[in-house]
Amino acid sequence: MWEYTFGENVMQHGFEPDPEEYKRLAEGKAKRNTKNSRYYPVALHRHQGRKEFFFASYPAASGFYKPDEYFWKRFQAEVATLTVRTEFIDTIDLDTFGIRHGIEHVDFLKIDVEGAELDVLKGSMGYLKNSVLGVFTEVRFDNSSNSPTFADTDHFMRKSLEGKA
């Protein structure tokens, strides 16, 4: 979204743990690719390690939090959120990844990771405190995926960034 405003000045870093989707992105077959897009086959989270990942029947609905099937079955088309398999995958926090890959600053974060947005934010504290100008993230108002809610994310951002001017 920011490439429309800032043009070729945007350096976009994307993270995709699914090998098939990562391949598509790396080959330039994603609608959000720009001249300055870089993709990495990793999963961002709050720290480096291994975490259980829930693969959904619709791949874009997959994530680190198992969806509440009772909640989602209320909606006819939401069978896409049903878990078809789980696997432990490697994770890394954005701060560590950035240091290792020479990413000096991040101006904007766009986070859509099916409920683990707060976890990614917690792993991005260095950037949040020192360079981030804006955050565009998905939040949930209901605990529909056993994941943090808007209130949790709002509280974290307010408390963690107190005094940042």
Image (spheres, grey):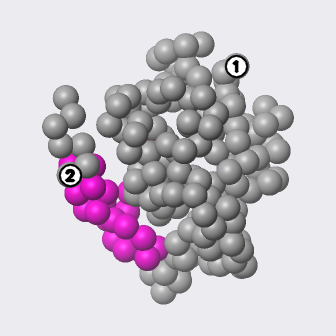
Residue 35 circle label: 1
Q: Is residue 134 left or right of residue 7?
A: left
Task: Give the amino acid at mark 2.
Answer: Lys
User: At 25% across and 49% down in the image, what residue appears?
Assistant: 160
Comparing 19 with 128, the one in front is 128
Q: Position of residue 107 (x, y in %)?
A: 43, 27
Task: Give the amino acid at mark 1.
Answer: Lys
- Residue 147 in magenta stretch: yes
Viewport quadrant of the C terminus: top left
Q: Residues under labels 2 and 1: Cα distance? A: 37 Å
| Comes first in the chain, label 2 or label 1 | 1
Residue 139 seen anywhere in this rendered image of the structure: yes
Q: Position of residue 145 (x, y in %)?
A: 46, 73
Vertically, is 105 above or below 20? above
Vertically, is 158 above or below 88? above
Q: Quadrant of residue 13?
A: top right
Q: Which residues are magenta?
A: 136-158
Residue 140 circle label: none
Count the marks.
Answer: 2
Q: Quadrant of residue 84?
A: bottom right
Q: Position of residue 106 (x, y in %)?
A: 47, 30
Q: Position of residue 79 (x, y in %)?
A: 62, 76
Q: Secondary structure at mark 1?
A: loop
User: At 56% across and 37% down in the image, what residue appears?
Assistant: 98
Q: Secondary structure at mark 2?
A: helix
Mark 2: few, some, or many residues within 10 Å (few <14, many ≥20)?
few
- Residue 161 in magenta stretch: no
Question: Mark 2 = which residue?
Answer: 159
